[in-house]
Image (spheres, helix red, strand yellow):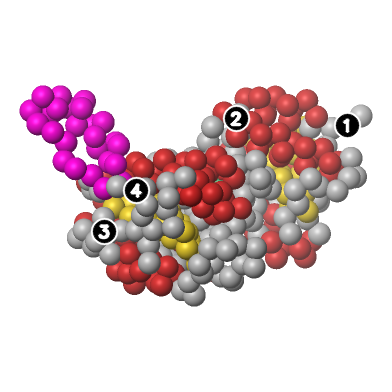
Amino acid sequence: MTKPVVLMTGPFSEEDVAALERDYEIHKLWEQKDQAAFFAQHGPRIRAIATRAELGARPELLAQLPNVEMVSSFGVGLDAIDFPTCKARGIKVSYTPGVLTEEVADLTIALMLGIARQLPQADAFMRRGEWVKGHYPLVTRMYGKRLGILGMGQIGQAIAKRAASFSMPVSYHARHQRSDVAFPYHATAVDLARNSDFLVVIVPGGAATEKLVNADVLTALGPKGFLVNVARGSVVDEEALLTSLENKAIAGAALDVFWNERDINRRFFALDNVVLHPHGGSATVETRGAMGKLVRDNLAAHFAGKPLLTPVG
Ligand code: 8YV
C-alpha cells in the first residue's frame, strides 16, 4: 500500500522522525534547497503537515498544498496557523494540549524562583570565585507574595495549583472571567499588575493579545514586581520591557519567550535583573516524547478515518 505523503515543516526528534517514516512518505521542508521546485513536484501529493507550534501552517505554505487534509501541530500555541484558510478548505487541525501542561507550569515556578532568588546570578558569582571575598547580596522572598496570572487556561490553573504550596495568593485576568475558577478576577491587565508581586503571562499569542503587557502594565507592576513570560514574546511590548528593566522600573523579568526567536534583542544580555531561557516550557525528554506521540496519533486517526484525538476547537 502506498504511504500517505506528509510534509514536516521543521525538525522533530530522531525517534519521532523514525516513527513517522515507518508510516508515511516524509518530506522535510527545511532541507529543500529549491522550495519552488519541491512544491511543483510534491505540493499536490501532500496530504498532511506535521508542524511545530512556532512554525504553524502559514497562508503561503497552505497555498502550495492544494490537497492537504490535515495539520498536526506539536505544541499548544495556535498563533502561527492560518485558521481562516483551514476552515474555508476543510483542513483539520490537531495540537498537543494536556501533555505539556504540568511541564510548562514547572518551568514557570523555576523561572519565578530563578529571578527572585537570582539563581543564575548567584551561580555566576560562585564560578567567578567571589564567595571567598564576601557574601552574595540579599535577594527577594517568593513564598507568600501575590501572584497575578494573565491567562487562566489549563496551564494558568496548573501554575496556580503550584503557587498554593508557596502560600501565594493568586488572582488573574483573562478575556473572560471563568465560572469554574474561584480566584479573584481583575477586569484589566493593569489592575492585575497593580495587585501582583509576580505577574505571570500565559495567554495565547496572536493579534488579540499583542503587546497586552505594555508600558502601563509594567508601570503598574512597579519597582518591586517581577514579570515572568511563558506565553509568547508577542504578548509583551519588548521595547517597553527593556526600558523598564534598564531603568529598574520593575524588579526583574524571567523570560522563556521573545519577539525575535532565536536571535533575541542583545540589550537583554547587558541586564543583571533578568533570567533568560530558550523557549522550552515543554522541553523535557518525557514531555516532548509525549507531544511527538500525540502528533503521530492524530495523524494516524485522520488516515484511519477516525476522529482526531485532540482537534482544535
Ligand atoms: C514548544 C510551545 O516550544 O506549545 C507551544 O505552543 O511554544 C512549546 O511547547 C513548541 O511547540 C516546540 O516546537
Q: Are marks 1 and 3 in contact (CB under 8 Å)?
A: no
**As displayed, is residue 262 above or below residue 160?**
above
Relative side of 178 to 26, left or right: left
Crowd class of label 4 (few under 14; some 14 to 19; many from 20; radius 10 Å): many
Q: Does dot 2 land on a helix, a strand or a loop?
A: helix
- Residue designated by label 3: 224
Q: Are marks 3 and 4 in contact (CB under 8 Å)?
A: no
Relative side of 264 to 161, left or right: left
Whichever of callouts 2 and 1 sits on the residue coming sooner in the sequence is 1
Residue lying at 19% horizontally and 32% vertically, measured from the top left:
125
Q: Quadrant of residue 124?
A: top left
Query: Does the residue tagged 1 have its C-beta within 8 Å of any atom of ligand 1?
Result: no
Give the distance between the C-alpha atoms of the residues marked 2 and 1, in whole angstroms.
32 Å
Residue lying at 49% horizontally and 75% vertically, measured from the top left:
187
Amino acid type, label 2: Glu
Whichever of callouts 3 and 2 sits on the residue coming sooner in the sequence is 3
Amino acid type, label 3: Lys
- The spot of residue 151 in percent (x, y) is 53, 61
Which disc, if any, is residue 142? 4
Which disc, if any, is residue 286? 2
Judge whether residue 34 can be spotted in this image.
Answer: no
Query: Does the residue tagged 3 have its C-beta within 8 Å of any atom of ligand 1?
Result: no
Does the magenta portion include 133?
yes
- The spot of residue 308 in percent (x, y) is 81, 47
Relative side of 238 to 59, left or right: left
